[in-house]
Image (cartoon, grey):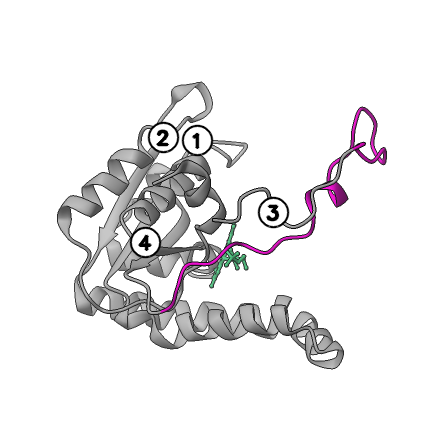
Amino acid sequence: MDIYEALYTTRAMRRVKSDPVPQDVVKSMLDAAVRSPSGGNSQNWRWLTVTDRSTVKELGRLYAEAWAELNATFYKGRRETAEASGDDATLRVLSSAQWLADNFEKIPLVVLAFHRNDPSGASIYPGVWSLMLAARSHGVGTTLTTVLGTFKSKEVAELLGVPLDKGWQNAAAVSCGYPLGRWGLAERAPVHDVVFEERWGEAPEWTVNGSLWNG
Ligand SMILES: Cc1cc2nc3c(=O)[nH]c(=O)nc-3n(C[C@H](O)[C@H](O)[C@H](O)COP(=O)(O)O)c2cc1C
């Protein structure tokens, strides 16, 4: 797959089939993840794959609680503003996120990424994104989620036997599966609106109308 196709179309693919992800594909995703950079090449990460139905179901119960908490706080105002202003794009994201919370137990594979001793907290995310790009190249949809680590870290650690006393923290839980829907180009604010040149606030001389990769 062309690298730009992967970069532009690796979206939050929450609605997926229950069909298992073959072991060769899982291996390829994880092997790509561990090729990614980390600060000082510390590789202070662990990757935990979960397919066992009862464990995924329990993760799903925790996920739904965590999502409900986020929904009632952080997203409450955003949802209300979106409803009032007819902001369909935001409402679509929230409805898709709700689908994942309601259907988490059907997700065939969850990959949890753990890190430790990383004050920046940044070293794990190149690996998570590489895992997601590798999955995309195999036709597997993924969603990077963080609500479990934010709201349910102790419960997740207990469920999965994670040694919190050794400093391991859950940075992400990536849901993975073959898409129910289709891949599409990620819509974003235009690049020239969020880039400065030389000094803060100085707009670049160029603009990009639409997207430079269109398939
Ligand atoms: C750091 C981070 C945390 C995220 N956490 C969640 C999450 O907990 N649950 C969820 O459904 N999506 C989560 N997402 C997915 C985003 O909502 C999604 O990528 C964003 O809305 C853009 O949509 P797109 O990827 O389809 O273009 C997260 C994404 C990132 C980068």
Residue at left offset 38%, top offset 36%: 127
Label 4 CB, ligand 1: below 8 Å?
A: no
The residue beneath circle 1 is 117
Amino acid type of the residue that numbered disc 2 sits on in the rendered structure: Asn
> Residue 50, image x and y in percent?
22, 56
* Quadrant of the frame with the N terminus: top left
61 to the left or right of 56: right
Q: Residue furthest left?
A: 23
> Residue 8, image x and y in percent?
49, 47
User: How many numbered circles are shown?
Assistant: 4
The magenta segment: 181-205
| Residues at circles 3 and 2 in contact by the CB criterion of under 8 Å | no
Amino acid type of the residue that numbered disc 1 sits on in the rendered structure: Asn
Which of pointers 3 and 1 indicates the residue nearer the eye?
3
Separation (CA) of disc 3 from disc 1: 38 Å
Which label belongs to residue 211? 3
Which of pointers 4 and 3 indicates the residue nearer the eye?
3
Which of pointers 4 and 2 indicates the residue nearer the eye?
2
| Residues at circles 2 and 1 in contact by the CB criterion of under 8 Å | yes
Q: Residues within 10 Å of mark 3 (few under 14, many from 20)?
A: some
Upstream in sequence: badge 4 or badge 2: 2
Which of pointers 2 and 1 indicates the residue nearer the eye?
2
Which of pointers 3 and 2 indicates the residue nearer the eye?
3
Amino acid type of the residue that numbered disc 4 sits on in the rendered structure: Ala
Which secondary structure, mark 1?
A: loop
Which secondary structure, mark 3?
A: loop
Residue at left offset 69%, top offset 80%: 83
